[in-house]
């Protein structure tokens, strides 16, 4: 029994192994080839293509040949060159003839045609057998290049190997840290501008100029990435973000090129899901509720909150500003109530409020929206009278239609709710004959009680005020109306005059101000004449007779010589003969006394007296108080004619002095 079990296990193991191991596969078979009878040894008749799905090594061999006398063999990756040619890849441009295949047909059965493989980089002229390169040889990645040339005359096909050796081949640039595809994982909430991957490149050609490029799949998300060709840094572009729920995988290819060859490598970017904030389905919600007491309102904005993470539990709260302290929100349902007694009457509180509501998920991520709350007015205040009762009087002289008084109440509501009307009743029907309460709450006299009611008769009226709110609210008050006699006693009224205040009279103040101004001007004029008098004399200034007109009107003698007509001065005979040189200081060609002086001695400055405190010029008149000459006295002069005094002693005075 045990042996049977072991045998079964071995059989199953063998069967399992065989089922797991895949055999090599041929492609392109079966086929047929025509071969000439004069073919040489080692002629390639057909290239067999075989692969192994598991990647295992394998070998090819011929199991049988029919007919048995055929002499054929199969080799593995054996290259038999019929020709080799060499070129300088750095200077060999596209379209250069690299080799010309020459073949003949022993049967002369037809024209020969040529083919070559692979044909990616090289071509052969089907009729001439010329082998050319499709691109500059410098773009070849490796040397040598092995080609298979096939020639056919229409019946027989012959295939040979051609090897092209190249030197000075361009070195292909490559990514040193992206030789094979790489994968990176980036968090969904990565900030924009974050470095995602830094690449490095290499080119073994000295001084090679390299260029770089990037391609993103899907192409529509190319703008999410930024690639610097200077630093070779891949970053999340500015203002961009990842969204795991929208796309969580990117395929980015980077290409480095030296104009001759290029290398492309792949970078796979996986986006890792991150916790995200909850969000409202609307940016603004609207609710309306009447004003009310604390705890009332029950405003339901019907918040709809979602979360990309799939979270279904949220809590609600208000951002603390803009009257949020007057409202309360249920953290789980989002129902809003008043936190205080909310009253919009007389603008005590705003009727329109905008609040910011916050949702918070289980990961403490938050989202916001706004809710607009409109509070409507409620008729919650009845009209209010200032007093419960009041007293009014009428007399025999009160005319019908007269307003006796008013008992208008107040209403704390606003708008229509604050409007009201009044009416009046009385327990005594006779009162309604004389008195009436108007809709404006005024008390009116309908008819005079004179001759009908006795003095001292008093009726009580009940005033009812009803506002215009819905539902309407009412309040009442009473007014007692007394009919009394008005006596005819004359009342003497004594009027006490208020004391006069000068400064309360605008005209008096203006007159006083003008008087002050005029007095100031007169004082200035008076001060001016005082100063002139002190320095120049009573009626004459520094220039004699500059006040002549003023002096003349007051009979001053100091200026009266100006009133005489101008006359010609003629020499006079003196009793005592004078010397001829006494008048040498005069000069008829000059008007100035100073400039007319010819006497050098007279023009020379005089020395100051030690006792003198004043500086004197060149003139030295004997009659001046500080003159150096002998002083003249009144006894030295005589009146030669009215108004003219001539001094008889001392030197003559200048003409202008007389």
Image (spheres, helix red, strand yellow):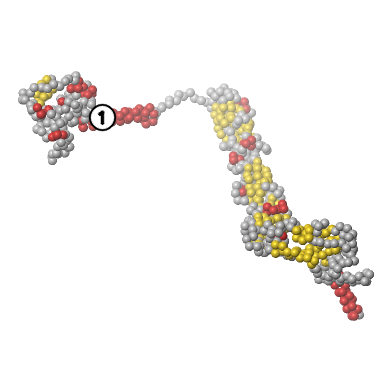
| 52 horizontally vs 493: left or right | right
- Residue at image x 65%, y 45%? 372
In the rendered image, the residue lying farthest to the top is 565
| Number of marks in the rendered image | 1
| 610 horizontally vs 220: left or right | left
SS class of the residue under badge 1? helix
Image coords of residue 69 (percent x, y): 93, 71
Along the line of sight, which residue is nearer the eye, 226 or 169?
Answer: 169
Image coords of residue 562 (percent x, y): 19, 22
- Residue at image x 56%, y 28%? 404
In the rendered image, the residue lying farthest to the right is 67
- Residue at image x 78%, y 59%? 131
| 277 horizontally vs 591: left or right | right
Q: Quadrant of the C terminus?
A: top left
Quarter of the figure with residue 381: top right
- Residue at image x 43%, y 26%? 493
Along the line of sight, which residue is nearer the eye, 325 or 394?
Answer: 325
Image coords of residue 373 (percent x, y): 65, 44
Q: From where the camera sits, is residue 601 visible?
A: yes
Q: Quadrant of the N terminus?
A: bottom right
Q: From where the camera sits, is residue 22 visible?
A: no
Residue corresponding to mark 1: 526
Quarter of the figure with residue 611: top left
Residue 417 vs 46, above or below: the answer is: above
Image coords of residue 506 (percent x, y): 39, 29
Along the line of sight, which residue is nearer the eye, 275 or 17?
Answer: 17
Along the line of sight, which residue is nearer the eye, 449 or 524?
Answer: 524
Crowd tier of the residue under label 1, counting other residues whose Cα lies within 10 Å: few below 14, some 14–19, many 20 or above: few
């Amino acid at each position: 029994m045990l042996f049977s079990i072991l045998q079964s296990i071995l059989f199953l193991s063998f069967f399992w192994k065989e089922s797991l191991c895949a055999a090599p596969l041929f492609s392109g078979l079966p086929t047929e080839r025509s071969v000439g009878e004069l073919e040489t040894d080692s002629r390639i008749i057909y290239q067999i293509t075989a692969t192994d799905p598991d990647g295992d090594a394998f070998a090819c061999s011929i199991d049988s040949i029919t007919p048995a006398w055929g002499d054929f063999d199969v080799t593995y990756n054996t290259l038999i060159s019929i020709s080799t040619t060499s070129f300088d890849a750095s200077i060999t441009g596209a379209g250069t003839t690299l080799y010309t295949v020459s073949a003949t047909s022993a049967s002369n059965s037809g024209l020969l045609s040529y083919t070559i493989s692979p044909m990616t980089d090289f071509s052969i002229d089907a009729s001439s057998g010329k082998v050319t390169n499709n691109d500059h040889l410098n773009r070849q990645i490796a040397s040598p290049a092995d080609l298979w040339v096939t020639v056919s005359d229409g019946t027989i096909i012959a295939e040979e190997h051609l090897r092209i050796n190249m030197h000075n081949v361009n070195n292909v640039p490559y990514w040193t840290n992206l030789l094979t595809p790489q994968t990176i994982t980036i968090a969904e909430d990565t900030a924009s501008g974050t470095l995602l991957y830094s690449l490095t490149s290499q080119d073994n050609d000295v001084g090679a100029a390299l260029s770089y490029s990037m391609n993103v799949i899907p192409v529509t998300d190319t703008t999410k990435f930024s690639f610097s060709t200077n630093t070779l840094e891949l970053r999340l572009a500015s203002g961009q973000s990842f969204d795991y729920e929208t796309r969580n995988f990117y395929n980015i290819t980077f290409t480095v090129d030296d104009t001759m060859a290029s290398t492309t490598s792949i970078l796979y970017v996986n986006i890792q899901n991150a916790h995200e904030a909850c969000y409202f389905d609307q940016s603004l919600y609207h609710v309306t509720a009447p004003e009310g007491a604390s705890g009332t309102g029950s405003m339901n904005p019907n918040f709809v909150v979602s979360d990309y993470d799939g979270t279904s539990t949220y809590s609600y709260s208000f951002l603390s500003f803009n009257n949020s302290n007057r409202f309360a929100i249920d953290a789980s349902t989002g129902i809003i109530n008043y936190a205080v007694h909310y009253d919009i009457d007389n603008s005590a509180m705003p009727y329109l409020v905008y609040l910011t509501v916050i949702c918070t998920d289980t990961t403490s991520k938050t989202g916001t929206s706004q809710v607009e709350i409109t509070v409507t007015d409620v008729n919650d205040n009845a009209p209010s009278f200032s007093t419960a009762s009041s007293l009014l009087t009428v007399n025999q002289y009160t005319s019908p239609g007269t307003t006796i008084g008013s008992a208008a109440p107040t209403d704390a509501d606003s708008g229509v709710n604050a409007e009201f009307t009044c009416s009046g009743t009385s327990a005594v029907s006779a009162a309604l004959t004389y008195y009436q309460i108007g809709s404006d709450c005024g008390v009116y006299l309908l008819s005079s009680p004179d001759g009908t009611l006795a003095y001292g008769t008093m009726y009580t009226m009940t005033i009812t005020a009803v506002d215009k709110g819905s539902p309407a609210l009412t309040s009442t008050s009473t007014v007692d109306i007394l009919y009394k006699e008005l006596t005819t006693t004359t009342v003497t009224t004594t009027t006490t005059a208020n004391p006069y205040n000068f400064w309360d009279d605008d005209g008096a103040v203006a007159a006083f101000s003008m008087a002050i101004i005029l007095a100031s001007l007169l004082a200035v004029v008076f001060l001016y004449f005082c100063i002139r008098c002190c320095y120049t004399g009573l009626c004459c200034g520094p220039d004699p007779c500059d006040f002549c007109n003023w002096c003349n009107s007051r009979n001053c003698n100091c200026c009266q010589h100006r009133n005489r007509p101008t006359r010609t001065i003629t020499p006079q005979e003196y009793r005592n003969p004078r010397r001829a040189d006494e008048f040498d200081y005069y000069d008829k060609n000059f008007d100035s006394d100073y400039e007319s002086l010819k006497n050098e001695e007279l023009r020379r400055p005089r020395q100051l007296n030690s006792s003198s405190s004043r500086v004197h010029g060149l003139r030295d008149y004997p009659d001046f108080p500080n003159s150096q000459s002998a002083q003249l006295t009144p006894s030295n002069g005589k009146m030669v004619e009215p108004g003219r005094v001539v001094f008889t002693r001392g030197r003559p005075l200048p003409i202008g002095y007389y």
